[in-house]
Image (cartoon, helix red, strand yellow):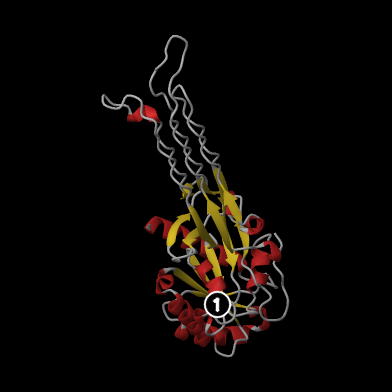
Amino acid sequence: MTEGNFVDYTKIYVSSGKGGKGSTHLHREKFIEKGGPDGGDGGRGGHVYLVGNKSLWTLFYLKFARHVKAGHGGDGGGDRSTGADGEDKYIEVPLGTVVRDKETNEVMFEITEHGEKKIVALGGKGGLGNWHFRSSTNQTPRYAQPGLPAEEKDIVLELKVLADVGLVGFPNAGKSTLLSVLTSAKPKIADYPFTTLKPNLGIVAYRDYQSFVIADIPGIIEGAAEGKGLGHYFLRHIERNSVLLFLVPADAADIRKEYDILLDELRRYNPEILDKERLIVISKSDMLDDELKAEMKKHLDVAFKGIPYMMISSVAQQGLVELKDTLWKMLNEGEEKV
C-alpha cells in the first residue's frame, strides 16, 4: 500500500430506504361483488450496514463513495401481497473503525471483528394494508398506513490501527528503519524529520510460524496532544496497541528527557494509554564503541530503574532477535493476564 492510499478518516452520507405504503385494495372476483379488504403491507426499506473486513487496512475506497443509499420498500398489493423489501447496502470497513455521528460527534459503535455487522441507518418499516383495519363496524376500510420515512445521517469513520506493538518516538528516531528490518514492510526512509506521514504496518515473523503486527506511528513532537505537528492525527492509533515500544536514538542529548516528553504527550492525550506495557529501545547503538555502551548502560540503569530497556541497531542488525523475543514474551504475558 502506498502512503497516499492510506486513509484513516472520512465522512460519508448514508440513507436507508423508506418503507412501502400499505394497500387499500378491495377484493373483487367473479360472483363476489364485495369481497372486502385485502390490501397487503408495504415492504420495509433497506438498511445500511457496516461490516468488518480483516483484509482491509484503509478507508481509501470510501473517498469515492461519499453517498450510500439503500433501496425503498415496495408498496403492498391486492390479495394481501406484501411489497418487496428494499435492497440493503453493505459498507466494508477495516477492523478498528470507529463510527461517529457527525452532528453530535458521539461514538455510535466500533467494528473490531471480522464479519461483525452493525446497522448504521435503519430502513423504514412498511405500512399496514387495509386488511388489518377491518372490523365489525367498518368492514370495508379504505385507508392504509404509509411507510415510515428513511433514516438519513452524516457519519464520520475514523480508523484506529489494530496492531500488537506501536512504535513511539520523535521524528527521525529510526522507527521506519526498525520496521523495515523486522518485517517485510517497505516504509519511506530518509534522513529528515516527518518522513512517515501515515502509519505503516508490518508483520513480524516469529518462531514456529507465529507472528505479530507492529505499527510505525508518525513521530511525536512536543505539543502533539494539543494537535501540534501531526497531533491527534496519529495519537489515536496508539490507543489500540497492546505494547508500546519507545524508540530513542543513542545520540539523543538526554535519553531520559526524550522518554519523559513522549510519555507526557501520551498522558495528556489519554491517561489510559499509560496502562499499557512499555519497552524502551535505544536505537543506533552501532554508533557507540564497547566503552561508551558500558558507560551508557550504567547511566540508563539509574535513569530507567524498574523500566525495561534494551539497545539495538537496525542498520547493523544488532539485538533484533532479543527484541523479538522480548516483545513476544510481553504480548503473551499480557494475554494470559487478560
Of residue 92 and residue 312, the one placed in the foreground of this image is: 92
| Left/right of residue 204 with respect to residue 44 in the rendered view | right
Q: Where does residue 88 sit, x and y in percent of width and height?
A: 54, 41
User: Residue 137: image x %, image y %?
Assistant: 26, 26
Residue 134 in the image, given as x and y percentages of width and height: 32, 27
Residue 225 higher or lower than 139, as above or below: below
Choose between 286 and 5: the one closer to the eye: 5
Q: Is residue 83 above or below residue 251?
A: above
230 up-or-down from 37: above or below? below
* Quarter containing the N terminus: bottom right
Q: How many marks?
A: 1
Q: Using the rendered view, name the quadrant where residue 272 is placed.
A: bottom left
Residue denoted by label 1:
231
Q: Is residue 97 visible?
A: no
- Could you tell whether 321 is left or right of 191 in the image? left
Amino acid under label 1? Gly
Q: Say which residue appears at 64% left-offset and 66% top-offset.
A: 179
Residue extending farthest to the top is 31
Residue ID at (63%, 69%): 198
Residue found 66% across the figure and 71% down from its top: 176
Residue under the image location 56 percent in, 70 percent down: 167
Q: Is residue 226 visible?
A: yes
Instruction: Say if 167 sits above or below 144 in the image.
Output: below
